[in-house]
Amino acid sequence: MQKLIRITTVPSSLRTLLKGQSRFMSRHYEVIGVSGDGDALTEVRQNEGIKTHVIQMTRTITPFKDLMATYKLYKFFKAEKPFIVHTHTPKAGTLGMLAARLAKVPHRLHTIAGLPLLEAKGNKRKLLDTVEKLTYNCATMILPNSYGLKQIIIDNNYAKPEKLLVIGHGSSNGIDTKHYDTRLVSEAEKEQLKKELGITKDDIVFIFIGRIVKDKGISELVNAFNNLSKKELNCKLILVGPSENHLDPLSPGTETIIKDNNRILAVGVQKDIRPYVAISDVLTFPSYREGFPNVVLQCSCMNLPCIVSNINGCNEVIEHKVNGLIIPVKDEKALENAMQFMINYPEKRNAMIQHTRSKIVERYEQEFVWNELLNYYKSLN
């Protein structure tokens, strides 16, 4: 059986971003998962039933550590002789593609699920542009996980169009539509959670799910909701996810509003987001940049209309006023107006619900995405 090595920088990405996919691929290839160490890697071994291998990588620019990790990857590839090396996440992509090229791995694939460098400026941007081009040069094929992202790569001259392939309709892993189903959250569970969070039957509940960082548009969201909550008494905002102050901190002003506005409910990381989605009315996701946003798929699949920024991925899942609203990036007033619209026009909001889940089931079902990727693997020789 041919070997397929999948690499992410940290093990939680291997566990979450590719959940179920490694097990599926292991019916056709000998799959090895590579990432830094951690409990999540143990879970990957158990849940996916594949071998794993530890190579520590950092998420920041660390030249000496990066060189060491590249050398270790090179030695590992020389020993394992894989048919395909497929990387995800920026650092794993750069080091993995370079090491795989040096080791003469025949098929070197890198999935792009967003370009953090688009927010960088000056010399840092120039450095990151150079690194990005190096990654693409070392790969035999680049797999952007949305059509918008493919266009951004072409516009920035990172790679020629013939070296780019979007799998299916986009998304790195599709979505388990059987799992993200509101019917799986009982009325009793919903009532209990509402009681715990102080949500009444009259409240319109907005929810954000993701990293609580500047890049996700949290400052705009918090300010917009803060203004809205002064006019609208029956509204709440749930923030689900971790803060990453060491990587992309919020301003002290934003932190203060989150703390002081008792209608903003910051609940931190949740192992199961479904109960929180089930008690919400609208997803608010004003991110500055994405590859293909899983949370928009998940919430749409659970019948939530979504307010999203006009960026690739988001504007491929959401159609304006059909299954949600699309607003300009970094536009606090437009976000506030969109939230106000969802409150003022419940009949229009309810009409959007009819077009949420059905579109996701049709285009982004997990097995469809996996089979599309498998078909591409099988085409390689």
Image (tube, helix red, strand yellow):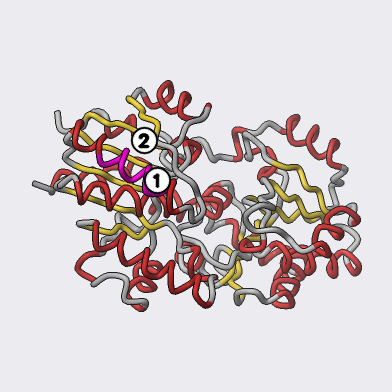
What residue is at 76 percent from the left and 42 percent from the top? 267
Quote the CA–CA distance across marks 2 and 1.
18 Å
Which residues are drawn in magenta? 66-74
Q: Nearer the viewer, residue 9 or 301?
A: 9
Disc 1 residue type (three-letter): Asn
What residue is at 40 percent from the left and 70 percent from the top? 129
Disc 2 residue type (three-letter): Val
Q: Quadrant of the N terminus?
A: top left
Residue 75 point in image, percent of width and height: 25, 36
Q: In the image, is residue 340 above or below residue 249? A: below
Q: Which mark's residue is nearer the viewer, 2 or 1?
A: 2
Residue 81 point in image, percent of width and height: 16, 35
Query: Which residue was labeled with disc 2?
Result: 34
The overriding secondary structure of the stretch rendered in magenta is: helix
What residue is at 67 percent from the left and 77 percent from the top? 331
Mark 1 nearby-residue class (10 Å; few <14, some 14–19, many ≥20): many
Mark 2 nearby-residue class (10 Å; few <14, some 14–19, many ≥20): many
Res. 173 mark: 1
Q: Secondary structure at mark 1?
A: loop
Q: Nearer the viewer, residue 231 or 8?
A: 8
Q: Nearer the viewer, residue 363 or 350?
A: 363
Q: Is 58 on the left or on the right of 145, as rendered?
A: right
Q: Quadrant of residue 227?
A: bottom right
Residue 247 point in image, percent of width and height: 62, 55
Q: Nearer the viewer, residue 188 or 85?
A: 85
Res. 293 mark: none
